[in-house]
Image (cartoon, grey):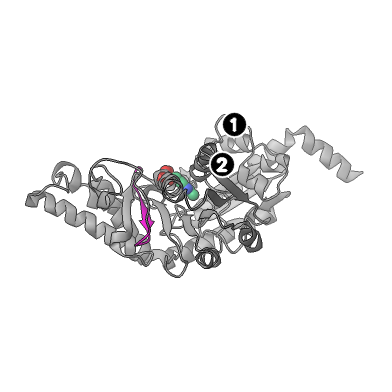
Amino acid sequence: MIYLDNAATTKVSEEVFEVMKPYFCEQYANPSAIYSFAGKSMKAVNEAREQAAKLIGAASNEIYFTAGGSESDNWVIKTVCETYKNKGKHIITTKIEHHAILHTCQYMEKQGFEVTYLDVDEMGIVKMDDLKAAIRPDTILITIMAANNEIGTIQPLKEIGALAKEHKVLFHTDAVQAYGHIPMNVDEMNIDFLSASGHKLHAPKGIGLMYIRKGIKVGSYIHGGAQERSRRAGTLNTPGIVGFGEAIRIAGERMQENMAKEIELRDYLINRVLTEIPYSRLNGDPVKRLPGNAHFCFQFIEGESMLIMLDQKGICASSGSACTSGSLDPSHVLLAIGLPHEIAHGSLRLTMSEETTKEDIDTTVDELKVIIERLRAMSPLYEDFIKKQKN
Ligand SMILES: *Cc1c(COP(=O)(O)O)cnc(C)c1O
């Protein structure tokens, strides 16, 4: 099997699994308890919190563990709206956000809030002039993702953060794809809230975090016990947190090395596809993109058939949009960068990890060439196109 869907989820690394193990059957105490048996668990949780903070230049008491990226995204939008509704009821986001952001914004619209969904340019990057023009006296939150989960484009966070600060608007970034993969610093980028998730970083599913800048008033989303400084109730997911902490430590330590390796492979893959497969295009910015992300569209191809045929060859890939199964709507991200429906339908996302090899890439491209040729041979549209070319 060749796994090229690391933007959907990653393998829990052996190192991470090892450090988690004792927290199931041996060190199982509720970390909030008084006895020293529990103290060990709390100590491990706090060490993970320190790793999580250090990676983005934050303080450990600004990190709150959650059950994942979706929860963190919901938390910030819903509670900022609730806390600041007397100041204003306007939110700014983009058309290319993850559904955890988009659907939460739509929910807030039903509650009487107003949302501006910014367009992006053809590379998928927010236009700073548009953002500036969208800010109003009643704007309470700007939420713009750090890097896109489909096309991998990285946003100009520093510029966005500076603009938000200048206008005294809170700035949240969904950094689920970026955290631990590319350098980020909450002070340099003026980030007030940041969402991240474990399972995109070789930690388990169901653990995530939120960074909340010290001094910022915001309500809690999960009510109950006093965990996480009373801001996020619920017994701490000790094994998950410990595993996430280790994954973060490793990601920080190896970031430069992993980035260099993945960028080299990514550019090799992109180059092979664009030169060897006719009527193909790269989506997203060639340079301002996640190290492990390659995203293509192939004309005259139906994306789902391509994925099924890749699967038959043992290659796990994705069309990029979360709702591939069942839905025939093309991705909102591809439409936002201006692709027509018929081209957006033939999309393929290949996302690597530091374990991906050149051999994996070569096999994938070789198989892909055959698959695309075969699918086009069955396509009446392609046949028409070729006939017209000849005339
Ligand atoms: C995966 C992802 C999420 C959701 O995170 P979960 O931990 O799966 O809830 C949110 N935003 C982006 C950009 C993602 O890639």
Residue 67, how many percent across, how many down? 34, 44
Q: Dot 2 lies on which element?
A: loop
The type of residue carrying mark 2 is Ser
Distance, label 1 to label 2, CA atoms, is 10 Å
Residue at the far front in the pictured view: 86
Residue 12 placement, left or right of 174: left
Tell me, for residue 360, which label it has, or none.
Answer: none
Residue 86 placement, left or right of 239: right
Magenta residues span 206-216
Residue 9 visible in the shown view? no
Residue 48 placement, left or right of 166: left
Residue 241, how many percent across, how many down? 27, 50
Disc 1 within 8 angstroms of ligand 1 (CB): no
Q: Are marks 1 and 2 in contact (CB under 8 Å)?
A: yes
What is the count of numbered marks?
2
Q: Dot 1 lies on which element?
A: loop
16 or 98: nearer the viewer: 98
Residue positioned 49% across, 60% down in the render: 262
110 or 289: nearer the viewer: 110
Can you identify the residue that label 1 sits on? 327
* Quadrant of res 390: top right
Residue positioned 57% across, 53% down in the render: 294
- Please rate how many residues cluster around mark 2, counting C-alpha atoms within 10 Å: few if below 14, some from 14 to 19, many from 20: many
Can you identify the residue that label 2 sits on? 321
Determine if the magenta segment contains residue 319: no
